[in-house]
Amino acid sequence: MNRIPKAINMQDMPGLKLQHTDPGVHSAIIHRLLFHLFEAPNHKEVVIVCIGTDRSTGDCLGPLVGTALSEHNSPFFHLYGTLEDPVHAMNLQDTLTMIYSKHRDPYIIGIDACLGQASSVGCIQVASGPLKPGAGVNKELPPVGDIHLTGIVNVGGFMEYFVLQNTRLSLVVRMSNIIANSLYAALVEWHNRSTLLAVQE
């Protein structure tokens, strides 16, 4: 697979949703991300925005992913949101303003934790379009991302702040490792294939 067939419209493609314990979760996430990445024009800078705070176990999925990705010190993407320097409700708008002023026509990948149905807890999702941070706790924040990845960390619908504060850290860590490893592998593969295609052309 070198390019996405023109017949595929990513906006019409249903989002990927898999339990983090699924044996094929890494491969499925990588392949879905590659579909999305090959839709992005080659000249765009890839920017990853990991949303959340280290002050809540349920909401630290994004910063954990960001911290794991930062250890690669990769030239393939620009990263915002780590445990040391989180992107959260208080600074999200300023961060997005800075991103659009600093990066020319960026391709943004948003990452965040979310709440869902009991049967979906532990699922990782990949979807086109922006994520809506804060929706699970009834906050209105700016949408983030050309595509996004989310991890369903707990049950939504009642006492959301309490639920986030009492989420199992072990689950969040496992999910964050899967997201970080899969995303990095996809970006490396995308870079290598794009470089090869450029040489062939």
Image (cartoon, grey):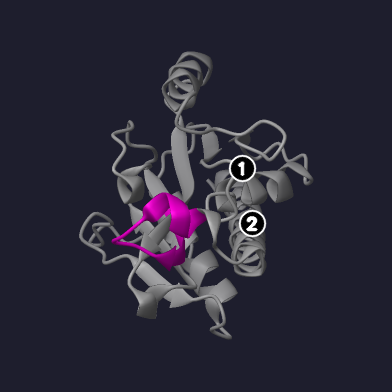
In the rendered image, the vertical position of residue 116 relative to residue 165, given as above or below:
below
Residue 175 drawn at (x, y percent): 59, 66
Of mark 1 and mark 2, the one earlier in the sequence is 1
Q: Check disc 1 and report the residue beneath it.
A: 55
Q: Is residue 98 magenta?
A: no
The x, y position of residue 129, in whole percent, is 30, 47
The kind of residue tagged 2 is: Ala
**What residue is shown at x 50% (from left), y 16% (from top)?**
98
Q: Is residue 169 found left or right of 166 in the rendered image?
A: right
Does the rendering let one see residue 78? Answer: yes
Q: Is 11 on the left or on the right of 152, as rendered?
A: left
Horizontally, residue 52 falls left or right of residue 68, namely left
Residue beneath the point at 72% across and 34% down:
84
Where residue 48 appears, x then y in whole percent? Answer: 54, 40
Q: Residue at x 31, y 37 (%)?
A: 139
* 161 inside magenta stretch: yes
Nearest the camera: 148 or 76?
A: 148
List the single residue furthest toward the top: 101
> Which residue is more in the foreground, 65 or 122?
122
Pick whichever, 83 or 201, lies toward us.
83
Question: Can you identify the residue that label 2 sits on?
Answer: 180
Q: Disc 1 to disc 2, how far (Cα)? A: 20 Å
- The magenta stretch is 149-164
Q: Crowding at label 1, few (<14), some or many (≥20) Cα neighbours within 10 Å? A: few
Q: Disc 1 residue type?
A: Arg
